[in-house]
Image (spheres, rainbow, N blue to C red):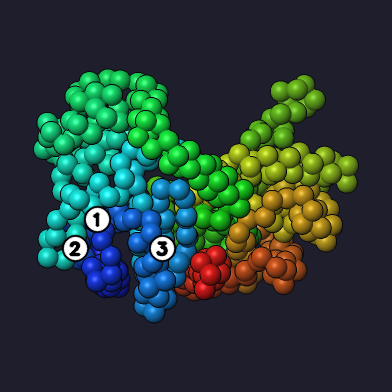
Amino acid sequence: MSTSSETAQLIRDVIGYLNENTEYAVMRNFEGLPDSNSARDIDIIIRKKDFRRIKPGLIDIFVRTGWKIVTYLDSDRLITFVCARNDGDRTSIMQWDFFVDTSVFGIRLMSADEFLKDRDFNGFLWHLKTDSQFLDKYLYDRAVGASYPEKYRSTREAAKDSPVVRKKIAEVLGSDSVEVCDRMPGRKMLLHAVGHNLRRRPFGFIGGVANFLRTFTGNYLRSRTGFSMGFTGPDGSGKTTVIDRTIERLGEVFGTAHAYYHFRPALFGNLGEVAHSAGIKKEVDRNYSDPHRGGKTGKLSSLARLGYYSVDYVLGYLARVKTMTRITKLVIFDRYFTDIICDSRRSRIYLDPKFLNVWRKLFIPSLDYNILLTASADTILARKRELDEQGIRDINARIDYLAGKKGYLKVLNESTPDAAVTTILDHIFESQHRKNLKRLGR
């Protein structure tokens, strides 16, 4: 896959800097770099002490060349930078993964020193030779009970009978035969790796596991690596198209690393369906093509709905959002709790917007970015006639009320969807960049 000229130049800048300043090796998928990249990321093995030394210069390259650090993950075994930039209506994304060893749960399988003894230079970059390319993936995948990827079959066939490979898998996994290791349970091989570490480096093993627990817990609790975003707006504002285009433009990295939800995490079923199953309600209106079909509810019914959905937001956030954003992944909501404030007819929660906003701040987990997408009533009516003019004006008035609150971005989608997407991504990239530079001590 060819890269944009901006991405190719970034790769040249980073690789040139590494060539001049440290020992490293690109681990796989290096053949076409910098002009063609067959993967969504570049995996690099480097000693931890060397990475710490070159990190300030690496960040300088990102900042100087106009790339934004969108996500930054610092774990026990790797440091990840996802960098992005907008050039007009085009988004370029590049993910850099710096591995300090190959390990599982802090249990070392192969050190950076071992890898860096088995590298070669192709005229542009240093890369691992075939044996080490195979060992990195194979040791990790088998230790966690996964199969070695079929797409790397040629690497496997070239390396599996190597004396170096046979010796290493015997030490770490318990057999010098790849075919035997293929059939062994992952738990058995992981326990063998634990024994190998305890015999060879008992204090390093204890420190590695402790470091894994520290970084894993810290990243989970702070959810500081991925991010979440929600879109709210009246029907006809172009949400679906803008969301689709946002995902498409983030697709180089987040295409397979995002989760998409409609309105809420949906740990629990539709309230009407639940009431019907419990025998409280005899019939359920399933005409979901008309989201504004329900009649107006009273305050008690509205409060009951609010309570039910709030439990789903709280528990669903912990189960489905936080588990994704703790690593470099993205969660997108087409509508979120904000929609309850802006469009009471859809949720059938007819309560004062100011009360709902206070409730939101007190009880509802916040997404990182809340996009209020709208347009004028005339524009919306020209696109879609699901709401009357007064209904659109009511929703826009509530959007204007929220627009001044912290954590919201109002975007007028009056021209092309890509223009709106660029505005949204510029805002997110800049905000993420500031947060990550602060975390990096800049």
Label 1 residue SS: strand
Residue 293 in the figure: left or right of residue 186: right
Question: Residue 44, how many percent across, how many down?
Answer: 30, 55
The residue depicted at 37 percent of the width and 21 percent of the height is: 188
Question: Residue tagged by mark 1?
Answer: 26
Question: Residue tagged by mark 3?
Answer: 52
In the current view of this chain or complex, which residue is farthest to the bottom? 64
The quarter of the displayed image where residue 30 is located: bottom left
Seen in the picture, residue 206 relative to 437 is either above or below; the reply is above
Seen in the picture, residue 145 relative to 265 is either above or below; the reply is above
Q: Amino acid at mark 1?
A: Val
The residue depicted at 68 percent of the width and 61 percent of the height is: 388
Mark 3 → mark 1, Cα distance in angstroms:
18 Å
Tell me the mark number nearer the camera, choosing from 3 and 2: 3
Label 3 residue SS: helix
- Viewer-side residue, 263 vs 312: 312
Label 2 residue SS: loop
Question: Residue 170, how many percent across, how many down?
Answer: 24, 27
Q: Residues within 10 Å of mark 2 (few under 14, many from 20)?
A: some
Residue 392 in the figure: left or right of residue 383: right
Disc 2 to disc 1: CB gap under 8 Å:
yes
Q: Could you tell me if residue 439 is visible in this image?
A: yes
Question: Residue tagged by mark 2?
Answer: 125
Question: Residue 263, how many percent across, how many down?
Answer: 63, 47
Q: Earlier in the sequence, mark 3 or mark 2?
A: 3
Q: Amino acid at mark 2?
A: Leu
Mark 2 → mark 1, Cα distance in angstroms:
7 Å
Q: Earlier in the sequence, mark 2 or mark 1?
A: 1
Q: Amino acid at mark 3?
A: Arg
- Viewer-side residue, 322 vs 103: 103
The residue depicted at 72 percent of the width and 47 percent of the height is: 347
